[in-house]
Amino acid sequence: DGGITQSPKYLFRKEGQNVTLSCEQNLNHDAMYWYRQDPGQGLRLIYYSQIVNDFQKGDIAEGYSVSREKKESFPLTVTSAQKNPTAFYLCASSKGTDPYSYEQYFGPGTRLTVT
Amino acid sequence: AQKVTQAQTEISVVEKEDVTLDCVYETRDTTYYLFWYKQPPSGELVFLIRRNSFDEQNEISGRYSWNFQKSTSSFNFTITASQVVDSAVYFCALTPRGSGNTPLVFGKGTRLSVIA
């Protein structure tokens, strides 16, 4: 079955440690996205990528980094510089030459807790 | 700048009632797309509908219907005869087209609770 996988579902880290969240898709989508969701909030865009080896900052990129070495993979690193890293992180992808016009498919999310 | 407002933070209805979730958007672009997503308790967002700015026809899919009115910049979502399985957070989202277009802008969501 095609889809997006994110692992792990729950992640616990100590403050000051970097942590990498994985996101893999087998939908052959060109564009991929990372969002952060806090309680009672909508989704806020962290980073997005339209093609391999290229990505752009979203609204809240500070304290995060990404890479896009393969079309299928878009890992997100939460660095120690991120002041409030505890959140629910969602990865998504979309197709097409104008990917923003198409619906995004979401993974199950990773809930990160930093203490 | 693009903005999506979902004024209803939480709604509770009794099963079988109809419920409408409001969505008001702001954009200066003449071409844009609107979306609705459902986020059940499991957390994964599920795509419900995509509508472009040139298509103002209302759409019905089973118990779901959408009313798009450009004159009031609204894209409201109605669930008819609600069921407990409809309990979720619903997000409205907007993406403009044109040079420098940006990915989806989400509203803050409306939490719907359907009580048996």
Image (tube, rainbow, N blue to C red):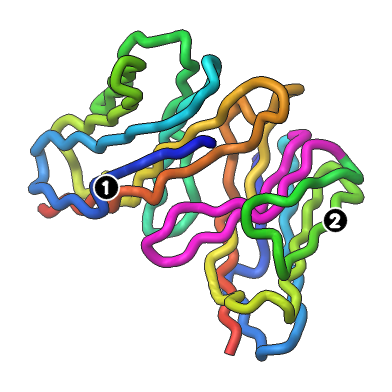
**A40 in relation to B87, above or below:** below
Q: Residues within 10 Å of mark 1 (few under 14, many from 20)?
A: few
* Image mark for residue A105: none
Q: Is residue A32 magenta?
A: yes
Q: Position of residue B14 (x, y in %)?
A: 8, 48
**B32 in relation to B80, above or below:** above
Q: Position of residue B99 (x, y in %)?
A: 71, 23
Q: Which residue is mark 1?
A: B85
- The amino acid type of the residue labelled 1 equals Val
Instruction: Between residue A72 and residue B70, name the one nearer to us.
Output: B70
**Chain of the residue under label 2:** A
Left or right of A97 in this view: A53: right
Q: Which residue is mark 2?
A: A67
Picture quadrant where residue A29 is located? top right
Q: Main secondary structure of the magenta part?
A: strand
- The amino acid type of the residue labelled 2 equals Ser
Marks 1 and 2, how far apart at CA: 37 Å
Q: Position of residue A115 (x, y in %)?
A: 58, 90
**B77 in relation to B84, above or below:** above
Q: Which residues are magenta?
A: A29-51
